[in-house]
């Protein structure tokens, strides 16, 4: 059984390869999407997975969302896809507001002004001139923390012609607890990014013994993750397994929709990095280079434990 730990105003539950967060996945039913606004019961359920309860893994993964809209409203696939985008945005906004209200000292101890931000990413090809800022980069699959973003969500799919890219989570807090480490003393930057990860000597055991990947349908469904991204308080890193084209030269797409409560100012970034004893500048390296879950040069390594989520109609979850 996973162990519970108290920080700030509420407990969370650690996980590992041997004690995986099986209850972190939440199936979305037709009843949950029957009306325009997500029901309060679902808001409360997701918030409880983030912080403050016995199954608070600091994250949740919601699935069967497209099938729920198709069942509830008789929608064709394309319309259900657009409905899921709106549903995810509305649900996350309410969940984030609730968690911020209930646990401000945990989620936003610096009292940084936060605003909703939403954008799309190409999770397979290089993103060109991202947000018209002249930055070309590959989506980050190496386990990492996002920047000045205490609450975030990734929406996956619908994928076309790709294999892999499973959402992964790594419990850095559990790793530090077991080895008597302070998380701010083992941090590093991923090359070519401003994203923080673990230093190489700590990254290997993190992936091998404290990481899980969710095998979930991203072709006929659009699952999405919701997570607390605070480094010291939550210690939860996220990434994705290796991605490759299903067939050479065939169309390959892996869209990701990102939604977060964030602050994109230089002042907020300076506060964020200072708290973590890290410089705010981007690390050296090619921004457009692939940033895989298992970096080159790390050597043979055991992949994260896979939690298989069976879609509705294939034997239940």
Image (tube, grey):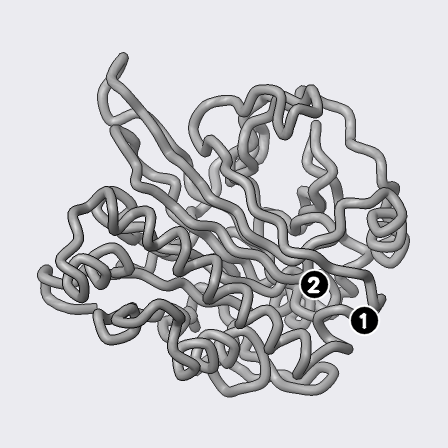
Picture quadrant of residue 84 = bottom left
Counting residues from the start of the chain, the first of labels 2 and 1 encountered is 1
Element marked by disc 1 = loop
Closer-to-camera residue (299/279):
279
Pointer 2 and pointer 1: residues touching (CB < 8 Å)?
yes
Which residue appears at 61% of the width and 65% of the height?
228
Closer-to-camera residue (287/221):
221
Disc 1 crowd rating (10 Å Cα; few below 14, some 14-19, many 20+) is few
- Which mark identifies residue 150? none
Which residue appears at 54% of the width and 58% of the height?
170
Which residue appears at 55% of the width and 52% of the height?
259
Looking at the image, the residue that sits furthest to the front is: 36
Q: Which residue in the structure is indicated by mark 1? A: 109
Picture quadrant of residue 26 = bottom left
Q: Which residue in the structure is indicated by mark 2? A: 230
Q: Quadrant of the N terminus?
A: bottom left
Closer-to-camera residue (89/307):
89
In the picture provided, is 100 more to the left or to the right than 140? right
């Amino acid at each position: 059984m996973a162990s519970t730990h108290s920080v700030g105003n509420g407990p969370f539950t650690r996980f590992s390869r041997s004690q995986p967060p099986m209850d972190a996945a939440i199936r979305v039913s037709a009843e949950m999407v029957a009306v325009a606004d997500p029901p309060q019961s679902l808001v409360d359920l997701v918030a409880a997975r983030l912080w403050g309860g016995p199954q608070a893994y600091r994250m949740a993964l919601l699935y069967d969302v497209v099938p729920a809209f198709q069942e509830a409203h008789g929608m064709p696939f394309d319309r259900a896809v657009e409905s899921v985008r709106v549903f995810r945005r509305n649900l996350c906004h309410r969940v984030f507001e609730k968690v911020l209200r209930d646990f401000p000292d945990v989620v936003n101890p610096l009292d940084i002004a936060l605003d909703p931000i939403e954008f799309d990413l190409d999770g397979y090809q290089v993103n060109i001139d991202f947000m018209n800022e002249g930055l070309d980069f590959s989506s980050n699959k190496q386990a990492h923390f996002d920047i000045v973003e205490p609450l975030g969500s990734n929406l996956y799919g619908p994928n076309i012609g790709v294999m892999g890219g499973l959402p992964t989570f790594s419990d850095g807090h559990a790793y530090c607890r077991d080895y008597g480490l302070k998380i701010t003393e083992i941090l590093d930057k991923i090359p070519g990014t401003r994203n923080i990860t673990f230093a190489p000597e700590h990254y290997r055991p993190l992936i091998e013994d404290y990481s899980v990947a969710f095998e979930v349908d991203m072709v006929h469904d659009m699952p999405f993750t919701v997570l607390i991204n605070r480094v010291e308080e939550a210690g939860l890193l996220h990434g994705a397994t290796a991605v490759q084209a299903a067939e050479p030269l065939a169309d390959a797409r892996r869209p990701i929709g990102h939604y977060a409560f964030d602050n994109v100012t230089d002042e907020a970034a300076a506060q964020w990095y200072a708290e973590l004893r890290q410089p705010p500048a981007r690390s050296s390296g090619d921004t457009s280079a692939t940033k895989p879950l298992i970096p080159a040069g790390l050597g043979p390594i055991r992949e994260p434990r896979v939690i298989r989520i069976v879609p509705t109609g294939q034997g239940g979850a």
